[in-house]
Image (cartoon, rainbow, N blue to C red):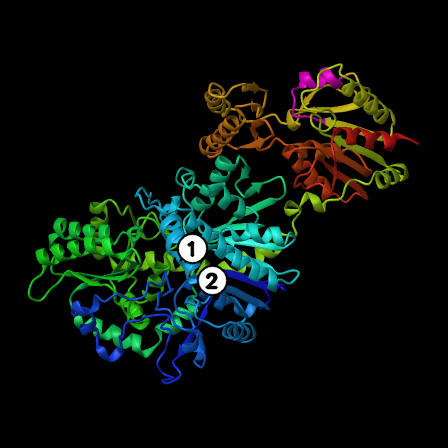
Amino acid sequence: MSLITENRVVIASLFLPCTIDFQHPSTPKAPVFTVEKKPNLPVAAGVPNLIDTLAAQQRPTADPSRPFVTQPKLKPTDLANAEWTVRPLSTGNIGLQNAIQATRHRIDKLLWVGTLAMSTDSLSADQRQEITKTLMDDHNCCPVMPTDAEIEGHYDRYCKQVLWPYFHYVVQADIQNMMYQNAAWEAYCALNQRFADAIVEQYQEGDIIWVNDYHLMLLPGMLRKALPRAIIGFFLHIPFPSSELFRCLPTRKELLEAMLQSDLIGFQTYSFARHFLQTCARILSLDATPTGIQMDSHYVSVGIYPIGIDVEALNRKRADPDVGRWVSMLKDKYAGKKLIVARDKLDYIKGVRQKLLAFEQFLIHHPEWQGEVVLIQIALSTSEQNEVRAHISDVVSRVNSKFSNIAYQPIVFLHQDIAFEQYLALLSSADASLITPLRDGMNLTSHEYIVCQENKCGPLILSEFTGTYGSFGACLRVNPWDYRQVGDAIHEALSMSQEEKTGRWKELYRSITANSAQNWASTLIGDLSKVHDATSRRFSAQIPPVDTRLVKKAYHSSKQQRVFLFDYGGTLVQHGQSTGSPGLARLIRVLELLASDPQNLVYVISGRTKANVERDLGNVPNLGLSAENGFYIKPPGEEWQQLFTKIDISWQPAVQEIFQYYTERTPGAYIETKDISVIWHYRTVGQDASYVAWQAAECQNHIADLVNKNFAVHVVAGTTSIEVLPNEINKAVVANRVLQDVQSDFVLSIGDDRSDEDMFGLLNKQEIPNVFTCTVGSRSTEAKYFVSNVQGVLASLEHLLHP
């Protein structure tokens, strides 16, 4: 199988896929550092003992989302002679680890950068150096070793108490809110900088740097500052909230601007990507398209990459004999009963309490299932467990006391994780799975459940607020806040015919295999390796200034028709320049000289109306004109023509209404209605500049929400304008029309804004010996060259005409 990329892939995530076990020198088998705590659940213990004896299972265990374990400070002398070993870390971002492992054979060179998920304050300098060398040489891992204080501020405070709640739509209003405490933010910045320093030290030309998740949102910006030409991708594994939530963060601009230094930003679902694009347009007033964001320095591609699981690897684990023995034990234990299985972290957003309340409603409204159905809820401990756990315990006690009898208990609540073999056995034995978080990313438990249901084909009940929701059309989709609906879905799942179960399962399984972990990782890395080389990612600083000598040489050596395609305002004249001004007079002299040569075909392609273009340039002999961004064309010596006959303009009233709303609230703004487009003009100068810029961003976001979804239109955001026009209308159409009628060996095209990019892209693909595409000013562009300003454009044309 071919490699995804020949470049080295550098993966930055908070946790490495491995960690270190230290052993006390006097008792080598006794670990000094217990990095991960796991319940002692040998197979011999038996499922009945595991499920029946809940009291012994309430001891807290390690939080899989928080591998760092707070431990007593150890003196360096305690560890001086301690032996240590490297072992896999079975916590952290397991989905990412599994995906990379599944595609490792297609990645030639790999370096993983992350923390060890353990305290490193007590390590000596020699031990740090030895650990780093071993991990680098033997495991392709570069450890980052922050202080315990940095971890506490970064992870426990800023990530878990600020970013995690807000990204999951939990608004913090308490007086201890970490969002308003600078120390937590400073720790977040410091840890991101540690990652940046480590990557810069290890960087090799051509590396693909893949930054993962909300812990490292500042890292792309720090890397771009130090490595301007690096290939940088960022992937967010959790939801991205709507702009209404994100704008509440005091550090919103810093986070967004750092992320936008990536070449590619990936999200799990369309809605997460849409929220990000709208947030950038609203908060930063950026020109967002469905596939990315155009900035002055570069273009940021935005993609959707739903993560999956490694089905083959999971099936190998399912084949473990221990899984089969646990399945047999469960079958005997719950003979004649229907099993519903769920496994969630015990934090607020996972909706465990709401799920249990819905199960209570199910038993109340469908009494025929009382005594016949058991819900086994696995609850993984988290740092937010105390208050949530108390509320959940109340519900469990009430339901069990209400519906239990001497031989039956409706809810089995296990406040701990279980061995993976037991987990797979539960998924395989279930008659339904109940996954109902209040907000979540992809939630790969649903994928694992479907694979484990190969024989039973039990239905999946899934919250509409999970990322998986959009891919799993055959599940039973529910609103977790609607307890009656969830209860009815449980009834439907348990009452479903085997034929319907099988049909639904096959559809879900097809979706899982099509969106596997291998496909996710290979697609994202493959796109990253391509996007940096695309013209759209070109930095203006890397585009050379137009070489007038080279252009002049090509011009005078031309044997065929020479074609000139110019934008008007901002390119040939300053924006707002009036008829009769000295600049316009100079331009007309240049155009007259160019157009007077029969070998030259000269067009000015403007976004202005026919009347405005005709007024300024209509008297120039042999000059071709185009108005309204290509909707109208006037070939030399001919009359105005429409390039399109059937264009839908039914969207204009809706756009005008939105523009009118913002005009009434924005000083100096006004609306211009053309035959084919509507423009909102505004000024960003004076004391109202910041307010007007904010209104413009709100207006653009409003258009995207209400108009772009329902009509085939696009928005061209200028420096002080927002124009809405049909998708078919662009300057590339005019350029293509002109080139069809001539045989040319020389093309010069100059423009200054986003409306010219389609034309540049078309011309760059033409098989014409000499094509010169130029942008005016410093910005990212499809053009091959740049000219500093309007004066530079006119000077270049005058130089071209000079013998």
Q: Name the residue rendered at 19%, 69% in the picture.
A: 51
Number of marks in picture: 2
Toward the viewer: 487 or 548?
548
Residue 66 part of the magenta-drawn span? no
Q: Position of residue 271 (x, y in %)?
A: 43, 44
Q: Which mark is residue 146?
A: 2
Residue 110 shows which numbered tag? Answer: none
Q: Which residue is mark 1?
A: 154
Q: Position of residue 179 (x, y in %)?
A: 39, 45
Going by the image, does 304 lie left or right of 641? left
Task: State left or right for residue 466 relative to residue 202.
Answer: left
Circle 1: is it few (<14), some (14-19), or many (20+) Cα within 10 Å? many
State which region is magenta: 605-618
Considering every residue shown, the one lying at the far right of the view is: 803
Tell which of 724 and 571 is nearer to you.
Answer: 571
Q: Amino acid at mark 1?
A: His
Mark 2–mark 1 CB contact (< 8 Å)? yes
Question: In x, y percent, where is residue 21?
Answer: 41, 75
Q: Helix, strand or loop at disc 1?
A: helix
Q: Looking at the image, which residue is at 59% across and 32% down?
A: 728
Left or right of 766 in this view: 188 = left
Q: Quadrant of residue 64?
A: bottom left
Q: Nearer the viewer, residue 553 or 167?
A: 167
**Quadrant position of the C terminus in the picture:** top right
Query: How far apart are the alpha carbons under marks 2 and 1?
Result: 10 Å
Q: Image point 46% across, 58% down: which residue?
A: 514
Q: Decide if residue 414 is in sight here.
A: yes
Looking at the image, is mark 2 or mark 1 earlier in the sequence? 2
Query: In the picture shown, does residue 45 fall above or below 795?
Result: below
Q: Which element carries disc 2, helix, strand or loop?
A: loop
In the image, 222 versus 533, the foreground residue is: 222
Task: Please name the amino acid that badge 2 sits on.
Answer: Pro
